[in-house]
């Protein structure tokens, strides 16, 4: 094959990837310039896969399909669509809606991705997924393919995508890549001599220089050498190639050129659509395969089967392969662009109008062709595009909806409609995670005479990214005033959204008492029920101390009354975390996580899991916290939530420090701190300091521990966090006692005693009871320890164990060894059960000093498995099948099976039936 000359290294890498396709999978992006040979390498890989018994599924992206959500996925999955009916219910419905096979609620992209992964996995045969021109795939399809590609390690599935240099692609950003370089001078010379052996030396040398090792240029430019104009031009290589194809196109009959133009502008390769529209554009002149014959003979188009892409390899020859059901396939994407470039404006508009007339039964595609044919603003077309945007959004195609709204804005006849559509597009761009697009759309909207409502929306949209942490256009006071004005203007829902955004700033940053009071005043002025979940969450973020009792009462009232709405439960879980009601927080966030999993809303799931991990950690429930924190970090990274990723990392660092894994904690601390420092993300920095303090305590560096923890209580420090500081009291107290800083600790405790009078925070009051006892005089200590132990610590095993340990140590120091052993024994048993190794060893050491030996502690599952493996093992122990576990964790059942086969030998067992007993011995 000419185009594979000099590609030995590239072929070897692809061959190695495809060679193991029957056992394991992987992904690779082939990147390079247009015509550099990416498609030839992909075709070679496909031939190798077929020879190994694999099935090849292909999709080819095209510019004209970018605005149609899941168009690429539809093309890829078409040959295996019958398997959709066998998918689990929620996945089946999500995929059917995405592929326009059914109507229903908006499917979450990740649920569609999971459905696609299972559909492919369940084919029962090795698969090669070939995505050509992936940079032109619609955004939804690209996101799904990226989701699938990240989960192929244990699947007999390989994904190969080709991407053109200079065009961004979701796949290229996330997957391993292979860059195809130009041919060497020697190989380029050999190829040119084979293609055009009669060239004279001067022309040959100039052509070699101009082609710059590009195989397509070396094979196509010699045909245009007679005019010599291309070699005299100083145009980019792509443009010269387009001109070369354009010169060939210009010699074709007019009817043939119109057929090609209609096909190039159409987003499908349907011959029927092309024939009908081309005939209409030529005033009813009949067209058929004979009309296309000159283009076939010129090597510009080929036949491809239904389900293939719009460019690539098909059957060539005069009319050969063009049976019923064929699609028109362009030999190369540059042929398609050359056809459009060589046509005049009037010809392109006529072709678009003809396609629009042909697509009456397909309103979404018709709207785009009407827009392309429009010569001036047209409100009817703008309205049609707006409806197309709604349909795209309904199917989960956020990127397509944004594009449709932006085009609708261009065609809007009034400034108000134009601004409204631009702002709607900007709002969706926040959801899509595109700050660059938000800024461009808002800048464009600001050129209009915006109404107050539009100005308010623009301010809110601009401040929506990363919970407003990196935005300085509007602070909490400005947002509070804006929320009040918006409400007074009649929009309570937008007012609440703005107020919620301002409340989030009080979590991630420290706006000061004045800003917090402004927000409280506005929240109090809104006509909301005191048990409105939105109000409770806002009060928890803005005033976790002053309104702590009201928030706690509201949370208790709503416990079990949320109606199963996972988003409401997520809000309530976050609110409970703010006031230190960790039991409630864990309950709400666990329920929210379950619902969000079912819905496939992985972005919100990452947040719910992070809250669940933090709450479970503070309660000492590491069996839950470990896998929750790991999954939260993984999903936050996958859904591009930088600060939530940092928050989850800091939770993992705290867990590692509690378990005595100090080196691991240090690595996690460094990464989390790197995420947080630039933006001053206080919750991350506060949790980082807690993890540092716990590590220092465990390693006996008590002065370092006190310094690390003290920073969280210092208002001038970036790690100060109004709510979270209240939950570090016991750790600070212990460090202070062990390094002679009792007076400094007492000063902090006195301030917190005043806060405790305003809030019913369980964590704050538990911490204060510990501090009072530990810092008390010998005359008062025993009474205070007993009072602390007598308080309700149901659900707080870590704090109960800590109290037993501290009281046992106090009793032993006061020569009451027999009494101390009761409490030290209770502490040891608690910490053994919780997997808190350093604390357990401390209790053992104290017991030895009190005259009692302890049984040797044996490593448990938490120490032998990764957090991810622990999560899978726990679900398997509950009796879930591999498929059910996969649905929970967004993995394929094959991947779950692979993990279990690694887990069994680690735990010394041979089957899943042994898991319950092993894991019970852990807890």
Image: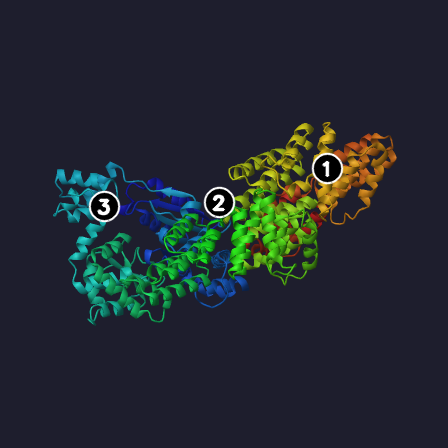
Q: Is the residue marked by circle 2 packed among few (<14), some (14-19), or many (20+) residues within 10 Å?
A: some
**Left or right for 496, reference 171:** right
Structural distance between the alpha carbons of marks 2 and 3: 47 Å
Structural distance between the alpha carbons of marks 1 and 3: 76 Å
Tag count: 3
User: Which residue shows up at 23% across the image and 57% down it?
Assistant: 339
* Residue 156 location (% of width, % of height): 47, 52
Between discs 2 and 3, the one toward the N terminus: 3
**Residue 458 seen by the camera:** yes
**Left or right for 203, reference 614:** left
Q: Is the residue marked by circle 1 packed among few (<14), some (14-19), or many (20+) residues within 10 Å?
A: many
User: Is label 2 in a helix, a strand or a loop?
Assistant: loop
**Residue 269 seen by the camera:** no
Label 2 close to label 3 by CB (< 8 Å)? no
| Mark 3, residue position | 217
Between discs 1 and 3, the one toward the N terminus: 3
Label 1 close to label 3 by CB (< 8 Å)? no
Structural distance between the alpha carbons of marks 2 and 1: 35 Å
User: Which residue shows up at 37% across the image and 64% down it?
Assistant: 385
Rendered position, 843 above or below 347: above
* Image quadrant in which you'd find residue 840: top right
Rendered position, 128 above or below 736: below
Q: Nearer the viewer, residue 203 or 56?
A: 203
User: Which residue shows up at 31% across the image and 49% down it?
Assistant: 40
Rendered position, 12 above or below 593: above
Q: On residue 471, which mark appears?
A: 2
User: Is label 1 in a helix, a strand or a loop?
Assistant: helix
| Mark 1, residue position | 749
User: Is label 3 in a helix, a strand or a loop?
Assistant: helix
């Amino acid at each position: 094959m000419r185009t594979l000359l000099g590609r030995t290294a590239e072929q070897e890498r692809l061959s190695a990837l495809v060679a193991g396709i029957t056992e394991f999978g992987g992904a690779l992006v082939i990147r390079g310039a247009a015509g550099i040979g990416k498609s030839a390498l992909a075709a070679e890989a496909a031939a190798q896969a077929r020879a190994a018994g694999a099935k090849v599924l292909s999709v080819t992206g095209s510019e004209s399909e970018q605005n149609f959500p899941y168009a690429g996925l539809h093309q890829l999955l078409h040959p295996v669509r019958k398997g959709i009916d066998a998918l689990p219910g929620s996945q089946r419905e999500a995929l059917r809606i995405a592929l326009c096979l059914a109507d229903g609620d908006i499917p979450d992209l990740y649920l569609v991705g999971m459905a696609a992964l299972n559909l492919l996995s369940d084919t029962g045969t090795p698969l090669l997924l070939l995505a050509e021109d992936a940079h032109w795939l619609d955004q939804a399809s690209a996101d799904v393919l990226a989701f699938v590609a990240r989960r192929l390690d244990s699947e007999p599935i390989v994904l190969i995508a080709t991407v053109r240099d200079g065009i961004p692609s979701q796949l290229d950003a996330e997957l391993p890549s292979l860059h195809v370089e130009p041919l060497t001078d020697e190989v380029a010379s050999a190829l040119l001599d084979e293609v055009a052996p009669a060239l004279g030396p001067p022309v040959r040398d100039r052509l070699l220089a101009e082609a710059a090792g590009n195989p397509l240029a070396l094979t196509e430019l010699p045909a245009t050498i007679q005019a010599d104009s291309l070699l005299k031009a100083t145009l980019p290589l792509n443009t010269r190639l387009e001109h070369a194809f354009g010169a060939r196109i210009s010699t074709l009959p007019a009817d043939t050129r119109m057929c090609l133009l209609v096909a190039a502008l159409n987003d499908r390769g349907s011959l029927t659509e092309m024939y009908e529209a081309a005939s209409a554009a030529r005033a009813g002149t009949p067209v058929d395969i004979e009309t296309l014959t000159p283009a076939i003979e010129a090597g510009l188009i080929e036949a491809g089967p239904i389900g293939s892409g719009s460019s690539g390899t098909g059957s060539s020859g005069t009319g050969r392969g063009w049976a019923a059901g064929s699609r028109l396939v362009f030999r190369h994407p540059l042929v398609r662009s050359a056809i459009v470039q060589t046509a005049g404006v009037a010809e392109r508009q006529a072709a678009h109008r003809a396609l629009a007339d042909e697509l009456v039964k397909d309103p979404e595609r018709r709207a785009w062709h009407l827009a392309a044919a429009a010569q001036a603003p047209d409100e009817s077309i703008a309205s049609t595009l707006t409806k197309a945007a709604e349909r795209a959004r309904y199917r989960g195609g956020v990127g397509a909806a944004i594009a449709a709204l932006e085009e609708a804005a261009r065609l809007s006849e009034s400034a108000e409609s134009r601004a409204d559509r631009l702002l709607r597009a900007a709002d969706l761009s926040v959801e899509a995670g595109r700050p660059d697009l938000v800024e461009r759309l808002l800048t464009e909207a600001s050129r209009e005479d915006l109404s107050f409502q539009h100005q308010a929306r623009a301010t809110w949209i601009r401040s929506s990214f990363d919970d407003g942490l990196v935005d300085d256009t509007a602070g909490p006071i400005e947002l509070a005033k804006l929320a009040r004005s918006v409400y007074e203007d009649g929009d309570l829902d937008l007012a609440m959204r703005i107020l919620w955004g301002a409340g989030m700033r009080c979590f991630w940053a420290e706006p000061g008492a004045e800003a917090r009071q402004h927000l409280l005043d506005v929240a109090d002025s809104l006509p909301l029920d005191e048990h409105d979940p939105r109000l409770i969450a806002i009060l928890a973020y803005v005033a976790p101390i002053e309104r702590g009792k009201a928030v706690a009462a509201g949370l208790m009232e709503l416990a079990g009354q949320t109606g199963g709405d996972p988003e409401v439960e997520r809000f309530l879980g976050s609110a409970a975390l703010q006031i230190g009601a960790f039991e409630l927080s864990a309950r709400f966030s666990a329920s929210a996580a379950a619902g969000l999993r079912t819905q496939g809303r992985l972005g919100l799931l990452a947040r719910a899991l992070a809250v669940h991990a933090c709450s479970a950690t503070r309660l000492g429930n590491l069996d839950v916290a470990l896998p929750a924190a790991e999954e939260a970090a993984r999903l936050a990274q996958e859904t591009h939530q930088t600060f939530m990723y940092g928050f989850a990392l800091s939770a993992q660092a705290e867990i590692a420090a509690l378990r005595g894994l100090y080196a691991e904690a240090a690595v996690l601390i460094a990464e989390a701190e790197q995420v947080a420092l630039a933006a001053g993300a206080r919750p991350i920095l506060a949790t980082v300091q807690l993890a540092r303090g716990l590590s220092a305590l465990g390693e006996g560096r008590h002065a370092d521990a006190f310094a690390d923890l003290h920073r969280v209580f210092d208002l001038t420090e970036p790690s100060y966090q109004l709510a979270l500081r209240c939950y570090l009291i016991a750790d600070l107290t212990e460090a202070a006692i062990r390094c002679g800083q009792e007076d400094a600790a007492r000063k902090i405790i006195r301030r917190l005693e005043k806060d405790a009078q305003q809030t019913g925070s369980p964590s704050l009051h538990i911490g204060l009871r510990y501090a009072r006892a530990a810092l008390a005089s010998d005359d008062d200590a025993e009474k205070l320890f007993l009072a602390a132990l007598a308080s309700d610590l149901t659900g707080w095993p870590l704090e109960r164990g800590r109290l037993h340990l501290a009281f046992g140590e106090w009793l032993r120091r006061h020569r009451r060894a027999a009494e101390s052993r009761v409490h030290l024994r209770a502490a040891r048993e608690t910490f053994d059960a919780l997997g808190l190794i350093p604390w357990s060893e401390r209790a053992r050491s104290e017991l030895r000093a009190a005259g009692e030996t302890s049984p040797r502690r044996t490593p448990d599952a938490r120490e032998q498995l990764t957090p991810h493996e622990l999560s899978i093992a726990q679900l398997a122990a509950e009796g879930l099948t591999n498929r059910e576990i996969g649905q929970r964790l967004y993995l394929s059942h094959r991947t779950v099976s692979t993990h279990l086969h690694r887990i069994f030998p680690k735990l010394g067992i041979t089957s899943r039936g042994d898991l319950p007993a092993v894991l019970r011995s852990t807890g």
